[in-house]
Image (tube, rainbow, N blue to C red):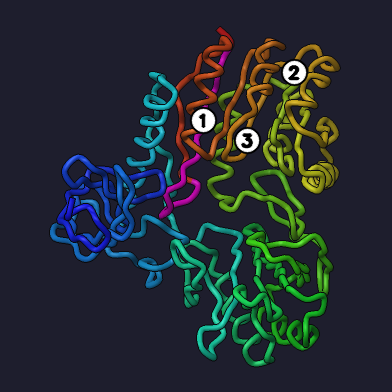
Amino acid sequence: MSNWRVGAEHELEITGLTHEGLGVGRVDSRVVFTPQAIPGDRVQVRIVHVKERLAYGELLSIVEKSPDRREPSCPHAPLCGGCQLQHMDYPAQLQWKRQQVQDALERLGGLEVEVLPTIGMDEPYHYRNKAQLPLGRQGRNVVMGFFQRGSHAIVDLSGCEIQHPLITRLALAVKTAVRDLGIEPYDEVRHSGVLRHAVIRVSFAHSRLMLVLVTRTRELPRAQELIARLTGEIPELASVVHNINPQVTNVILGRETNVLWGDEYLLDAIGHVRYAVSPLSFFQVNPIQTKVLYDLVQERLHLSGRETVLDLYCGAGTIGLYLAARAKKVIGVETVVPAVEDARRNAKLNGITNAEFHAGRAEEVLPRLIREHAAVDAAIVDPPRKGCEAAVLEALAEAGVPALVYVSCNPATFARDLSRLTGLGYKAGPIQPVDMFPWTSHVETVSLLSRT
């Protein structure tokens, strides 16, 4: 077909969105995915990549605007890969995220479960507490920001709608200082240069900053001058850390980390619980919505103080520690050993004595824990995007755990696992989507499952 080739142009009506936030339209019976297009748009596109039954298009112009379209408030939105939905009204995003969960449950899980309206943010801006910013050169200029959508070209940062303002202030100061001091940014094509990334964390509770400088080399040139300059300009800076990553890899952080100046940890809080966040710690990036999420988990479980609760895929134990005051005992399991150490440290920091944390794969550790704690009253699973191992769900069902709260960041694997749990004798209550990442295509869900 002459109209089904790279370079062909078409006018499309956009009727849906993919889970990545790409607009869905059709040419004859074939699907075309187009970035920056939303349902209700009529657009002119150019085909840039063709497969047998689908293609990817480049947006050329908007012939007719969707009623849900808005002008992005961020100047980087058309190129930056950080946000996928800056061009979509926020209420429409919340509706689409609910629909995304509903569609996954019906199409992938074969389930009919009530999906509640998505809980959004009152102020859906500047909510992120962490940024991972690559550095490079464009011509003679030092650039630092986010990768362009679908490439490793760096979109040079001048501001950001979703990062905490202190992160942006420090990022701009780092870029200027690196340029002025002649510290060479990394060149990933030649695997040369020094400074690969600046990873910046901010404590929402205390307005303090941690800067992690990731280098290809063991030495960070002019480190003391850089620290003196940044601490003079940014009084909120509490810690400067050096991470060494000499590998040819897309993984940001290397294995060796040293504190160059200031504090070893950044103190933050979610509700009543304090957390010491280390340079390599996993910590939810939206602390405002994290409290909403954890309160939902607490409400769903109806804890009375007499329950033993398993917290699987627990990371640094943030959910378990948040619930510990309402439970008899919390038992966390996590594969990443440093995260388990963080969880134990944070338990001590808060004087929590009824929480214990175990390192290991949930499917391997879980049977032993169930044998040791005959009466497990509830479990929380908060797995990575790939979802739960089948052996974990089977072990929970075999132990007869009466209540299970599933927290998910991926509607597709969530639907698959809910289908498995239904077959194992669990019934899902209403599904609650939570918008943890406004202006992006991601959505979090919380569901209580009860033994039938």
Could you tell whether 87 is left or right of 119 in the image?
left
- Three-letter amino acid code at the position of disc 1: Phe
Q: In this view, does 122 lie above or below 347?
A: below
List the single residue furthest toward the top.
452
Q: Circle 2 sits in a helix, a strand or a loop, which is it?
A: loop
Q: Residues within 10 Å of mark 3 (few under 14, many from 20)?
A: many
Which residue does the image show at 13% across and 60% down from the upper left? 63
Left/right of residue 341 with respect to residue 136 in the rendered view: right
> Circle 3 — which element?
loop
* Front-lying residue, 274 or 7: 7
The residue that label 3 is drawn on is 383
Front: mark 2 or 1? 1
Q: What's the amino acid at mark 3? A: Pro
Give neighbour class at mark 1: few <14, some 14-19, many 20+ (Cα, 10 Å): many
Camera-nearest residue between 273 and 182:
182
Q: Which-is-in-front pick, marks 2 and 3?
A: 3
Mark 2 residue type: Arg
* Of the image marks 2 and 3, the number of the one nearer the N terminus: 2
Mark closest to the chain's N terminus, 3 or 1: 3
Q: Residue 306 carries which label?
A: 2
Numbered badge on residue 414: 1
* Residue at (78, 26) in percent of width and height: 364
**Disc sitting over residue 35 in the figure:** none
x and y percentages locating residue 354 in the rendered image? 83, 30
The C terminus - image quarter: top right
Q: Distance between the residues labelled 3 and 1?
A: 9 Å
Identified at 70% across, 70% down, the residue is 211
Residues rendered magenta in the picture: 436-450
